[in-house]
Amino acid sequence: MRTALILRGSLLLALVPAAVRLQQSTCVQQLAALGVDTSWVDAGTPAEACTKQLCTSSVHTDCIPGTDAAGNVLPPLEQEDLQLVFSDEFNEPGRSFDVSAGDPKWTASRMWYAGTEDMEIYQPEQVTTANGSAVITMEQVAPNTSYAPVQRPHGEVWNVTKNYTSGFFSSWNKFCFTGGYVEANLLFPGDHFISGFWPAFWLMGNLGRPGFMKSTGGVWPYTYDSCGGDASGTELPGANTPQLITACNDTDWDRSKYGLLPNVGRGAPEIDIVEMKVPSSLNESNNFAPIPLDTPIGGGPGQKPMAFNSMTLQFAPLLPNGTSWMDPNNCCQQCCSATDPMQDGDCQGQGPLGPGMFLPREGINAPGSPLKGMYTHATFWQGVYADGFNQTLQQMNRMCLLDNIRPGNAVQDAVSVMAALQENFYEKNSNATYHRFGLDWRPKEYIRWYIDGVLVYEVNSTVGRAQNNGTYEVGERLIPVEAMAIILNFAMSNNFTRVDIDRLPFPSNYKASRGIDYVRVYQPKGSINLGCSPPDYPTAQYLACKRDTYIIDKADDVLIPDVCEQLPYCKSEWGYEYRGGDLLGPDGNAVQQQNVSSPQDCCQLCAAEPACGAWVWNPYFGPVCTFKQATGWNRTSVMGTLPDGTTYEGIFSGVVYNANSTTPRGAMPGGSAAPGSTYAG
């Protein structure tokens, strides 16, 4: 890692011209001069990284370097100096990102990521810093020795064990930004031949907590501000729920009590900067036999496909069946021939790109480009609504486009492309080196992906245009406007690429680890927009009032520092049962509600009963919600396995707080918590 240049002494400063002093001053000093919070900037960021020149033209071709008559490279036509507003250089060794460590920027999660059926569980200890980088380590562990919780879509939580552990860390509800340029310097694990590793670098809106499926239902990946149209695709098996916070007039809730603005559609959109994929190294047509290591890699017949980076804007709601942002007319007929798809005539082998999608190759192939010859193409992903194009593609004699025409699944449309990667992107190759992956995001305008400073992909607002299939219409889906958090993780899942588990390396000592050299965020000096709850798109009160949707154990409670100001709320914990202290009804029996579908619903029922101070949700008997008094109960762990093999770890218990209160309902005079309360203010 480079070290920052720090000038000391007033005499030295006086001898340096003003323009040079600005260039050489620390990034913290430069940001302070703009009157902006400097706490997000790492003091170790080198001075040359304090600003970044970036093309800001609305026309993507202006952002491609040109050449003069002599062949010299010319800079893009329009460039702007952006100011560093966030950085982490990861220079301090041995950092912990466990929630208990209180890192101001990052939290490493303990969970199983159910949405992609991962083969690993995430543990905070798998993320640390060493040798000037953040490092996520994937390790094999003995069976039944490592456990982590998973929150399911209805809010229930179960304990999961896997034979592999890895790391997932994010800035969720700590650092968020709205628009700007974010960049990470990355080194991928493994090599470019053996498939299975899935490192990622991505953004998600703060209204959803990544990996917590109750919190993301109905908000991920919505980026929609129209009334109506959000039910498209909800008839599909495993579909997303309609948008929870719509642009329509509310009839069944008062959003102002959650700190939200009226008639504004909200969501937690996702932008994937990096999803590295090595195509299967197992022969799926031959009983998944290992493909020999001497098989050539490329795009031709008999070659193993090249490893690539997937770059994606995730959209919801789904467009109606029979519509797409792609365009089959933009791919010539040769793309369905037996010829090498990388030599695809006038289509340039890039697939049926639609309006608002660009895969410029001029910068990639410019003199001196570090990516010279890189192959880019629309992602091969046959989505659930691809069959709506069967008749059209048959008439065009281009049925092969089913793999490109409508990527996505029942919960998301994926405006996605791929860029092939050479072997030096991978840690196990002898010539491995770090590479820069960046994203320029302008809300409502465009998103541009960069690799090593070269523009490789753009989507603009046209891609999200309103469309209808004659019977159903979906309005415009916006280039995201929500405040976004930063996420980095390292996974394995057969849902992404076939995991060649017997040939992947799993040593200790971080040798199969992914290195993250730095993460930096830049914004225009005149429009700096930081914070996870900006005035136009607030999140703080929504999270505080629905705290038990986002937080499942006491340790994580610090991640939502606010209290709900206008409504009662709950602090709940999974794996504990509050025993005794039942709230009794007129008949002398414990007050219970049967068939309560989630612990969050149990919380709301208890909060609506003034005499109820705590509650227990048990999924094994109904499920049933039992009301408790404010006192008289004991907190008991139920994480073990009973002699008959029954596991009771799905039980939830929680304490009710009145609106704008920092002490549990029924707290004793003087502010002390009631006996049995684990959440004293």
Image: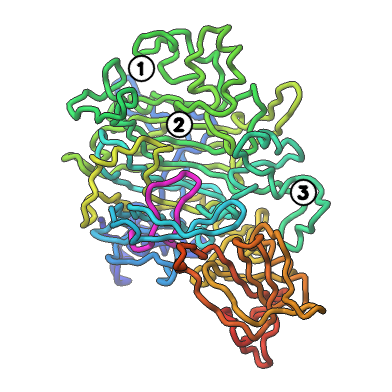
Image depth: mark 3 or mark 2 in front: 3
Coordinates of residue 38 in the picture (x, y in percent): 46, 65
SS at badge 3: loop
* Left or right of 275, for residue 5: left
Element on which disc 2 rests: strand
Looking at the image, residue 111 lies above or below residue 610: above
- In space, the residues marked 3 and 2 are separated at their CA atoms by 33 Å
Query: Residue drawn at (63%, 62%), measured in percent from left and top?
Result: 621
* Callout 2 crowding tier (Cα within 10 Å): few <14, some 14–19, many ≥20: many
Mark 1 or 2: in front is 1
The residue wearing badge 2 is 457
Region rendered in magenta = 107-126
Question: Quick one: quadrant of the C terminus?
Answer: bottom right
Residue occupied by mark 1: 342
Q: Foreground residue, 464 or 160?
A: 160
Q: In which quarter of the image is residue 346?
A: top left
- Identify the residue shown where x is 57% and y is 34%: 413
Left/right of residue 312 with respect to residue 489 in the rendered view: right
Q: Please provide percent x and percent y for residue 406.
A: 55, 26
Tell me the residue that label 3 is attached to.
263
Residue 320 in view, yes or no? yes
Label 3, residues with CA under 10 Å away: few <14, some 14-19, many ≥20:
some
Residue 497 drawn at (x, y percent): 38, 35
Residue 119 on the magenta segment:
yes
Instruction: Specify whether residue 363 is painted magenta.
Output: no
Q: The disc labelled 2 sits on which kind of residue?
A: Tyr
Looking at the rendered structure, the number of numbered marks drawn on it comes to: 3
